Image (cartoon, rainbow, N blue to C red):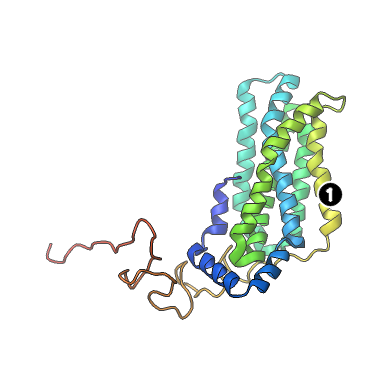
Amino acid sequence: MLSHSYTLAVYRYTVRNVYRYKTRVAARGDPAAASSRGEAFRDGPTLLCYGALAGFAFWLYAFGPALALLRAELHFSYTVLGVYSALWSAGAALAGVVFAPAARRLPRAPLLWFSAAGMAAGAGLFTAARTIAVTMSGAVLLGFAGTIMLTCIQAILSDRHGERRDRALTEANVGAAGCAVVAPLLLGLFQATPLGWRAALALPALALAGLYLRYRHQPLPAAPAGGRPGAIPGAIPGAGPGAIPGAGPGAIPGASPDASPDCRCPAGCWPPWSPPAWPSSSA
């Protein structure tokens, strides 16, 4: 599964214990409704995000093996090879700075498609050029646009599925993880053909073009008005991440009766929470 520090923004305000409890209760109470929700889970926006994430993952996992093949052609040193990876990371760091203001000004659909086009352009520079400088610029663009697209996908899935965001993000990452095997394999297969390894890096661009033709008119969830990424719907403004409107002490089902009234932890959680010990005034 993909593991990036910026995914924390998606999970930051998620109360997983409450979500899982409510999902299990709903499934037990109304089997027909649960079945209907399962059938509608993988809808248009969800499949679009799954496919786009697979394209990003293919380029991500193909980047390392492609660097080795590129080094054999351009004859640069291992130090320069490391610079390519550093430039990808620099592009990703820049995306972390740019994404929040961009997300406030652009709807989700243009942000997703522009970043996908940026990734395709970066892959084109990386594969079509025969100079180190231009291929390095392609690496920066891949890291920048790819991170923008990845974060946008996570936000869309989270806003689309709400309490079931864990399932959507897990399914997306399972599919993307398969590219860790497929991408290097296809690079090796294409390298043994007259097309060369560069043709393998064109496959995600073709897939993204197909997704655009299929889903270009697909409405996507809008960003919460004035909200934080991944904020819990209905949370009390300015309250802590676990605040629930109208909830008193022990509102979380299964809370231990001897837990602190300020923060009741579900029974069985570990380690158990206890309030901090404050020094006495006489000390």
In terms of image quadrants, where is residue 197? top right
Q: Quadrant of the C terminus?
A: bottom left
Above/below status of 38 relative to 202: below
Residue at 72% across / 65% down in the picture? 39
Q: Secondary structure at mark 1?
A: helix
Provide residue 111's location: percent of width, then percent of height. Answer: 73, 57
User: Is residue 214 placed above or below 147 in the rendered structure?
Assistant: below
Q: Is residue 78 visible?
A: yes
Q: Where residue 264 sits in the image (x, y, percent)? A: 37, 69
Q: Residue at x 67, y 65 (%)?
A: 160
Task: Say which quadrant the N terminus sits in.
Answer: top right
Above or below, 71 against 123 in this view is above
Q: Is 253 left, or right, of 183 in this rendering?
A: left
**Whether residue 177 is situated above or below residue 162 in the rendered picture:** above
Q: Nearer the viewer, residue 21 or 229?
A: 21
Numbered circles on residues, count: 1
Residue 76: name its quadrant. top right
Question: Is residue 99 something one can see in this rendering?
Answer: no
| Residue located 57% across and 58% down the image | 10
Q: Residue furthest bottom?
A: 246
Residue at mark 1:
209
Picture coordinates of residue 69, whole percent (x, y): 73, 24
Tell me the kind of residue under disc 1.
Ala
Which residue is found at the position 44% from the left and 71% from the top?
Answer: 252
